Image: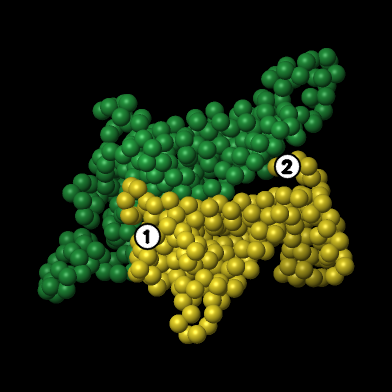
Chain colours: A green, B yellow
């Protein structure tokens, strides 16, 4: 197992390096003059050739690409993520300010998705073809199809019209005012959880059905065990493995998938920060944010492979 | 022809929900294909169905609720939302179909090559897919669109890239089993080249998982396209897409008018729902073992 883990870890090194190169190159071929977004089109044309050169030099944009690349990586490795092009805050400070909200939403949404998906998936599988099954299957198919940012918009409109509720336009951290903070994050969390619960419930239903047709379940029944014991002691345990593994995917998906929901609901998290950084051509901010997403995602993939290897010895020796 | 008809009849009988979604998909495709005839303000003397173009506003009726003239109402600048939904249908379908066809095919080719050749080639392809997989779909697409100026075809390109890794993995595992079959060995014994074996003998056997995968991806591609449009990274205005219509509704205020929000959202949901249901039905049809499991 240690050998497998080491090999998988080793494989992720070139992956992470390639990610940094892809991000770096993509952010360098961005069309348009970085100074235009920096100063605005009017002022940029007023700059003299010399001033231009000075600013470009100051931002380090005149160095050869590989120098810029290694400066970025060197900074990241030493914990210095650089400065935002526009904001007075450094990228690190921006992250510390914005990340908690996004992480809270992702965690809350993952937990909520279990609370929704596990009973729904189990009921659906154990009472196959009942009305409950049809209803829950319809609900899962429906929530797979609804764009979550649209649901977010509907909730915002509804809250405003019915409850006259307006989300505050500044960030409130959990440690500053827990209740206020929760009142901001529960709406996006529920919406994201509904979308995440749909594939989870679907998958749980399929695995429970599969497990229930296995020989060892028949054996358990033949021993005279009642349905409740068969399900709780024999079926669920094996059916939960893929479900838990899949939650890893969901957690990663939430970090990426919440971007549009954040924008739709006016939540100031990492997602909305990334969108504005890309729109404003704030290169350093955008490339560090995408790098963080990339690294988290790589390790989630690693985690999933390793979990599978723990539960299924065949994979280790492939 | 009679064969197809009886097959279809069987499909509708076995899977009424799949049949219904097939009808919806055919309807959407018809709308998409004829969109240029349906939408237009008829200035050139041609008679159109909606009577309005997607970009020209009706200044006498701005932000107006649905009425007999504008079935889905008008937006802030008086543009006919019904016409814009129809043009959005066309763009969503083009993006989804082309990007899924391209992405799934590239992934499939990589998967089959890796599975058949094995060794170093397989290892390199696997790592390549892993790199692409290291980004959440939406972020990878955003990154691609940050690098290239957004238009219909760069959006297609960005979304097709996100479709490669999953397809590569699924098709590789399908091709692995097939590569070990006796008939492939027989082909090799006759002296057929690797290229010929891969694309004449292995690939055709992977058709069923390919089709299932492609249909399942269509819904995802539409959702990504809509999200990109919503985030302002998709096909740029004034061209209408469902995503950028929602963005426009959201930009107005905290209190968008209901017809700004409802119609694009319902269009996305119905389209994705139809593609997903059709994909499920197709999988049941192509893999009889799954029939009735309702995965």
Residue at point 39% right, 44% down?
Answer: A157
Foreground pick, A290 / A133: A133
Image coords of residue B80 (percent x, y): 44, 66
Q: Are marks 1 and 2 on the same chain?
A: yes
Image coords of residue A220 (percent x, y): 80, 19
Image coords of residue B172 (percent x, y): 68, 54
Check the residue under mark 2 and report the chain it is in. Answer: B
Which quadrant of the view contains residue A226?
top right
Asked whether residue B47 is in view, the answer is: yes
Count of numbered tags: 2
Q: CA distance from mark 1 to mark 2?
A: 44 Å
Q: Judge depth for marks 1 and 2 and give the one in front.
A: 1
Residue at point 59% right, 73% down?
Answer: B34
Q: Earlier in the sequence, mark 1 or mark 2?
A: 1
Foreground pick, B292 / A218: B292
Q: In the rendered view, tell whether residue A110 sits above or below residue A9.
A: above
Question: Helix, strand or loop at disc 2?
Answer: loop
Q: Which residue is mark 2?
A: B294
Q: In the rendered view, tell whether residue B201 sits above or below residue B267.
A: below
Residue at point 20% right, 69% down?
Answer: A41
Q: Which residue is mark 1?
A: B63
Which quadrant of the view contains residue A236?
top right
Asked whether residue B102 is in view, the answer is: no
């Amino acid at each position: 197992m240690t050998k497998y883990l080491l090999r998988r870890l080793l494989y992720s090194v070139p992956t992470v390096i390639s990610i940094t190169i892809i991000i770096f190159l993509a952010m360098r071929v961005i069309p348009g003059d970085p100074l235009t977004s920096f100063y605005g089109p009017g002022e940029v044309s007023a700059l003299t050739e010399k001033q231009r050169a000075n600013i470009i030099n100051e931002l380090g944009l005149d160095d050869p690409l590989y120098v810029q690349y290694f400066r970025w990586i060197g900074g990241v490795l030493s914990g210095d993520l650089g400065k935002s092009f526009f904001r007075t805050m450094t990228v690190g400070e921006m992250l510390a300010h914005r990340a908690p909200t996004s992480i809270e939403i992702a965690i809350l949404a993952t937990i909520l998705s279990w609370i929704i998906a596990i009973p729904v998936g189990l009921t659906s599988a154990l009472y196959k073809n009942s009305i409950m099954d049809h209803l829950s299957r319809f609900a899962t198919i429906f929530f797979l199809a609804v764009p979550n940012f649209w649901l977010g918009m509907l909730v915002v409109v509804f809250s405003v019209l019915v409850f006259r509720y307006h989300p505050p336009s500044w960030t409130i951290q959990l440690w500053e005012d827990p209740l206020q903070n929760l009142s901001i994050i529960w709406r996006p969390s529920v919406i994201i959880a509904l979308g995440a619960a749909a594939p989870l419930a679907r998958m749980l239903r399929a695995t429970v059905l599969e497990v229930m047709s296995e020989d060892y379940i028949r054996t358990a029944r033949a021993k005279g065990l009642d349905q409740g014991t068969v399900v709780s002691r024999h079926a669920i345990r094996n059916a939960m493995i893929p479900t838990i593994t899949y939650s890893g995917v969901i957690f990663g998906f939430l970090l990426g998938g919440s971007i549009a929901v954040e924008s739709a609901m006016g939540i100031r998290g990492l997602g909305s920060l990334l969108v504005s950084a890309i729109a404003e051509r704030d290169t350093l901010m955008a490339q560090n944010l995408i790098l963080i997403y990339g690294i988290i995602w790589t390790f989630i993939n690693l985690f999933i492979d390793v979990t599978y290897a723990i539960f299924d010895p065949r994979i280790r020796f492939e | 022809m009679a064969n197809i008809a009886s097959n279809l009849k069987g499909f509708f009988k076995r899977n009424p929900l799949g049949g219904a979604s097939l009808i919806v998909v055919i309807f959407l495709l018809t709308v998409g294909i004829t969109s240029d005839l349906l939408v237009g303000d008829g200035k050139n003397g041609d008679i159109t169905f909606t009577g309005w173009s997607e970009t020209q506003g009706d200044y006498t009726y701005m932000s107006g609720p649905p009425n007999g003239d504008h079935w889905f109402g008008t937006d802030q600048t008086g543009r006919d939302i019904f016409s814009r939904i129809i043009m959005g249908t066309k763009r969503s379908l083009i993006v989804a179909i082309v990007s899924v066809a391209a992405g799934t095919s590239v992934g499939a080719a990589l998967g089959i090559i890796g599975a058949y050749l094995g060794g170093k080639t397989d290892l390199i392809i696997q790592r390549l897919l892993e790199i692409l997989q290291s980004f959440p779909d939406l972020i990878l697409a955003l990154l691609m669109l940050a690098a290239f100026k957004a238009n219909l075809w760069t959006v297609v390109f960005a979304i097709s890239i996100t479709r490669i890794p999953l397809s590569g993995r699924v098709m590789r595992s399908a091709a692995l089993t097939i590569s070990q079959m006796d008939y492939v060995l027989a082909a090799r014994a006759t002296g057929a080249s690797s290229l010929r074996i891969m694309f004449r003998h292995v690939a055709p056997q992977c058709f069923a998982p390919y089709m299932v995968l492609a249909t399942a991806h269509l819904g995802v591609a539409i959702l990504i396209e809509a999200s990109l449009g919503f985030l302002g990274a998709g096909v740029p205005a004034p061209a209408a897409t469902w995503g950028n219509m929602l963005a426009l509704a959201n930009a107005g205020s905290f209190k968008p008018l209901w017809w700004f929000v409802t119609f694009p959202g319902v269009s996305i949901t119905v389209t994705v729902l139809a593609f997903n249901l059709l994909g499920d039905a197709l999988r049941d049809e192509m893999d009889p073992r799954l029939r009735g499991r309702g995965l």
